[in-house]
Amino acid sequence: MSFQNPVFIPGPTNMPEAIRKACDMPTIDHRSPLFGQILHPARAGVQKILKSDTAEVFIFPSTGTGGWETALTNTLSPGDTVLAARNGMFSHRWIDMCQRHGLDMQIVETPWGQGIPADRYAEILKADTAHKIKVVLATHNETATGVKSDIAAVRKALDAAGHPAMLFVDGVSSIGSMDFRFDEWGVDVAVTGSQKGFMLPAGLAIVGFSQKALAASKTAKLPRTFFDIADMTKGYAANAYPYTPAVGLMNGLLLATEMLLKEGLENVFTRHNRIASGVRAAVDAWGLELCAETPDLYSDTVSAVKTPDGFNATDIVTLAAEKYGVAFGVGLGEVAGKVFRIGHLGSMTDVMALSGIATAEMCMVDLGLDIQLGSGVAAAQEYYRGSTGLKMRDAA
Amino acid sequence: MSFQNPVFIPGPTNMPEAIRKACDMPTIDHRSPLFGQILHPARAGVQKILKSDTAEVFIFPSTGTGGWETALTNTLSPGDTVLAARNGMFSHRWIDMCQRHGLDMQIVETPWGQGIPADRYAEILKADTAHKIKVVLATHNETATGVKSDIAAVRKALDAAGHPAMLFVDGVSSIGSMDFRFDEWGVDVAVTGSQKGFMLPAGLAIVGFSQKALAASKTAKLPRTFFDIADMTKGYAANAYPYTPAVGLMNGLLLATEMLLKEGLENVFTRHNRIASGVRAAVDAWGLELCAETPDLYSDTVSAVKTPDGFNATDIVTLAAEKYGVAFGVGLGEVAGKVFRIGHLGSMTDVMALSGIATAEMCMVDLGLDIQLGSGVAAAQEYYRGSTGLKMRDAA
Amino acid sequence: MSFQNPVFIPGPTNMPEAIRKACDMPTIDHRSPLFGQILHPARAGVQKILKSDTAEVFIFPSTGTGGWETALTNTLSPGDTVLAARNGMFSHRWIDMCQRHGLDMQIVETPWGQGIPADRYAEILKADTAHKIKVVLATHNETATGVKSDIAAVRKALDAAGHPAMLFVDGVSSIGSMDFRFDEWGVDVAVTGSQKGFMLPAGLAIVGFSQKALAASKTAKLPRTFFDIADMTKGYAANAYPYTPAVGLMNGLLLATEMLLKEGLENVFTRHNRIASGVRAAVDAWGLELCAETPDLYSDTVSAVKTPDGFNATDIVTLAAEKYGVAFGVGLGEVAGKVFRIGHLGSMTDVMALSGIATAEMCMVDLGLDIQLGSGVAAAQEYYRGSTGLKMRDAA
Amino acid sequence: MSFQNPVFIPGPTNMPEAIRKACDMPTIDHRSPLFGQILHPARAGVQKILKSDTAEVFIFPSTGTGGWETALTNTLSPGDTVLAARNGMFSHRWIDMCQRHGLDMQIVETPWGQGIPADRYAEILKADTAHKIKVVLATHNETATGVKSDIAAVRKALDAAGHPAMLFVDGVSSIGSMDFRFDEWGVDVAVTGSQKGFMLPAGLAIVGFSQKALAASKTAKLPRTFFDIADMTKGYAANAYPYTPAVGLMNGLLLATEMLLKEGLENVFTRHNRIASGVRAAVDAWGLELCAETPDLYSDTVSAVKTPDGFNATDIVTLAAEKYGVAFGVGLGEVAGKVFRIGHLGSMTDVMALSGIATAEMCMVDLGLDIQLGSGVAAAQEYYRGSTGLKMRDAA
């Protein structure tokens, strides 16, 4: 395997040296006070990154999908109604999970490339005078389409309807990279994983619960054991887990939160926006368009680039991997073959981004697209030259 | 944190250098063929370690507890009947999980320190002429009591009754360290984790399914998504996962299986028995007894040592951690305060074991027990000197 | 410190994962047979990379400079005559070392940017009928100017004169990256270090001696202890060193030789030529010139790029470091401020090279040079697209 | 190779996790300001560990032997007179180096097992009214015999004679582990390496020069280049080296000094004395004696244990390596076969020491010595139980 080039997939991201080393930890007794010195500050760090003063943070040896399951099974009972928009592969999968757990789904089908239709949510919520809807799902950043949705608008829809439903947000590819406001947006459950904004290997589901969601867990009847937050709460009180925690990953998470908070969350977001803007300048120079329909939807963590009709976008991904040893993301679901994705989150610099742009360019030319070599690179260079470089710095 | 001394907890174990390095892997594209080169041989290696030609191996970013949930939710429906013996904390927890998932438990209460009462199982199975019992649970090695049970005898009980129930075995603290025979014993689901015999960090649930268990999954109605083996099967066919896999841990698992198979499974088992025998010689020299009531029950991966009445065994564990920086295991559940546990599985040598024995000795003397310093060490030394040393060797 | 971007200095190079891990080794007894299992195959591997069947390879915990000192002090006596060309900073330094050790230097001053003037060597050697010249020095690849010299031509000059002087070659920035033929060229001492073609951290001087050089060591009177090859020879015979060896680096060297030989030396050289050719295409597209005066002199490991008169080339290096976090090499000695250097040896891909080229471009534009953004990148892309990509692959 | 057991050689020592990680560093530009941020604080840290306010610290990519050569070649001229005692293999080797460099040696032959005879030094210095002696050598801790010498007494001998000779001290196996007072003892050059008290891999010569020694370097005529402190001084002023530094090791050295100073030097010395005292209690319990003749000579970093006449002590070392995978040190030179050595410096705990003691015991019994298993362990346990445990703690 070649590990020389950076990856440009929308997670797992490139990992900083210091984080890899924090994860690569010798065995300690996970029932000792030592573990508490990792667990508690890591949870507190996540809380700050969620911009919450009150969220209860749970961390499972799992992934974002496990985080979704944690959200649902701890708060809902079979037959409960859930409102969700389907505008990409990841919102689709969360809906699918709900259905498998016997929930009654009210789905707003939405074109892939658009964000959550908050106005439709508002209408539906207003109409639900019986308050059958228990939970509203919102995918903050659709990793499949590179579309960012307006969570504040969803909150407004709930408030306007005076609706008591809980708001569950999938922040897997936004939290730690793009602005996320748990308290201000009135989020009830936020879900993410270790391998995106936290720049860790996959292996942790990271979930924040509001007090309202915690209260709901007392009566929720969906079966759960591995993902039971009550067991977890009891464990945490004793510096422990109900089972064996992934200690090294937790240690890495602690460092990741320290690094992000030291850099400053607004700086982190600005940095991601800067890298993303360079990539978007390149896409524009190529004469191509993003899957995200309008600039307000542009994701700062992943860009899904539409290729011309009749061209299989997946060929770019395959060629990049085989000929140049570079990983991009393929299109998924409805946009399979229509887009390829450039991940630009986590531990990424302008210089690394340029090598990804250059590689995409070579592949597109190799495959016969009418792209000028160096054109996207030049546009991104121009942008990066002029913008303030807020560079993330590793601790050694 | 001090990482200088080995740990003597019954998992996570001390980790070989080479395995730590295999886990500490840069980011790769988990949807690329590269990942398939890790995934498939790792699964094949686990199958061999299970001594199976046919078991379908599933690996989740989770823990052994998640493995239990995988076993249950993929094969059973609410209200199904399950037979289980409760003879320690881990069998207790698996039973608890069954109850939470709405299964109807038939529990054989068994003294902690004894193995699974195969004769009681035989009677119950014979009496269940309606074949209401769908699954028989068996904890191969009770980590809480250091008791190994006779799985072949459980199989015989099933066969003698001509009973079609499936046999699910918790091999978390036995597989990869003690003899385990998936095919010969007619196991239907075997569950383990990464942090025991495989000497990896915690973070993987490793599960083997028989063809019969796979068939049962077609009709099982317990809700599942994260732990759904059908999604996993579909993913594997495309060198992938239904979500993001823990690539580094998988890479470590691949190496672990290679190391164990290269050493030879029988050699691995002999090595564990040798280390354990030295520890047991020390316990005997101290004039103490194991929780396991008879020699046929002695576990080769963990020894639970009973301390005199009126003495709090947990004090040994606390003192060892605080004064000597050494981790032992406390007693759990019914044997809390009555035993302390010495883990001796995984990456452990005779020389390391001697330092654990010496530490336990110091602590017991510090706490006023009538133990002679050096006595347990001398007994273990005598044993280790005379026995054939089959030492595990790292690849660099 | 930020470790995210590759470095483009002419050594130490970017390091492959597998090599870093091989170097990061726990303590072993360096007087045990284990060490012999590293030492001997590492020396044998170096011999093969030197393309020699007979060279005696010595490895000191030191650097290339220590290798030069090893060459001189083991073979010469005070007052001995040495012939050398000065055509760059590194040939200059080796000459300076000779002078400090009391050797009588016959120096051929050569414009920086030109190679060793083999014809001048030929004249001098022919004129030296008394054979006062004991050693001829030759810097194979002048790291300061990016100039490769023709060692075969130097050998021819010696042979044509029937001169018995020994031929000492500084291959620090060529061996393991560019074709080097110890036996065919009749080299008597070859010197390199760990941090260039071997892709290791600095810390090893690696030296090959011909039988003739070994014979000379019997009578050489320059004082030496640390660099004494006689002590080293005695040590090697006992799997050991006369002092403590740098075991981890030696282990890394062993792996590096295995990786290079597995890839195939000719493939390694082709790979370096390919990366270098892309860089040179970029320089050409910028309208700039290399310090190396003619194509036959172009180095495949480092390019020294001349900037316009009145421009301080060092500003590019400073800006790249400060604004973009990228390391290039400054001009040294006579070419300080006149050139900046792009190192492209060792663990470097086309994709990485493109990010270096893009960065240099941004810096030059930032500093007011009349360069078109993307122009060098496009030229390199065009080259890389068309050439066969022989990619180095890490072992995991 | 098995890396599971600790080593008990007198260096390289077992390495703390954090130090290994600090050494395992990606490539940076060693001519950039980043390197200065490692270099200068590392040198300042070493100065503090030398207990000096004024010593100029030089760090070479080399070993302690290179440090000796640095001391001699920078301060002396051919034919200069040097006074030295030979009381072990390492003092012997330093004398040998002097002789090879053409120095005139005045040697005080001293029984191996005794310290430097300061009274003999006093007589000789008093008699040298012409002040022909330029340098007095002193090996602070003879690693071969486990003998600590009284450097303050050597200083007194110089002062009593009013002799201007410089005092050079080999502190390779004492500095960072045992009390060393550069300023108070009037040391002119102190020499050590990275792989002992600093707990790093081998690869650095670490040398402190007094102002007097620096002055002597202006006129010293021994040839030198690699080890020239004038070049090094010039380099340091520019955050650089005259050649490529071993950056990772320097980074590790920086951390090592931080760790030692944070623990507190007196605590470090007490910790070493405590571990050593337990080992000595074991030796006493075995009925054996140390090579060091009297308690004031006992080294706190290494114990050379004498075995009975007619017994080959080296057999213990061989058996320990082959049967138990544990490394001890063999006897060297005059005491070859008569002693085996237990290294107990650096990253070592009481628990680790007990495993070494237990292993030595097993080997001695295996080889027929009349030793009682567990006896040495019991004596050490008794000591460790009662003494205050000052445990070194890694930073994660």
Image: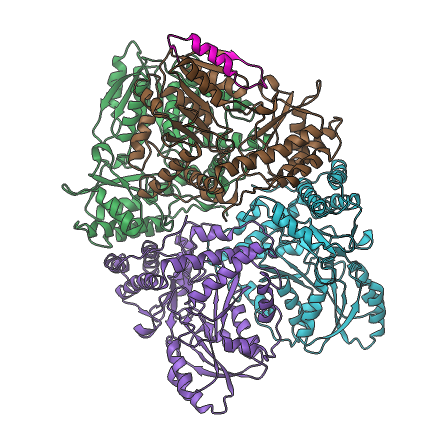
Chain colours: A brown, B green, C cyan, D purple
Residue C230, quarter of the rendered image: bottom right
Viewer-proximal residue, D87 or A373?
A373
* Residue interval drawn in magenta: A108-133
Could you tell me residue B377's position as x and y percent?
A: 27, 52
How many numbered markers are drawn? 0
- Which residue is pictured at 53% across the width and 47% down the height? C21
- Most extreme residue toward the front is A160
Image-quadrant location for residue D374? bottom left
User: Which percent across, then down, holds residue B95?
Assistant: 29, 23
- Location of residue A230 in the rendering, given as x and y in whole percent from the top left corner: 31, 26
Question: Does residue A124 show up magenta in the picture?
Answer: yes
Up/down of D219 relative to B302, above or below: below
Query: Is residue B38 placed above or below C369 in the rendered structure?
Result: above
Task: State yes or no: residue A177 in magenta.
Answer: no
Front-most of residues D203 and B114: D203
Measured along the vertical axis of the image, is residue A326 above or below residue D68?
above
Q: Name the residue located 54 percent from the left edge and 75 percent from the top edge.
A: D214
Q: Nearer the viewer, residue A334 or C138?
A: A334
Q: Is residue A67 left or right of residue B84?
A: right
Residue D32 coordinates in the image, percent (x, y): 60, 55
Q: Residue at x 19, y 50 (%)?
A: B367
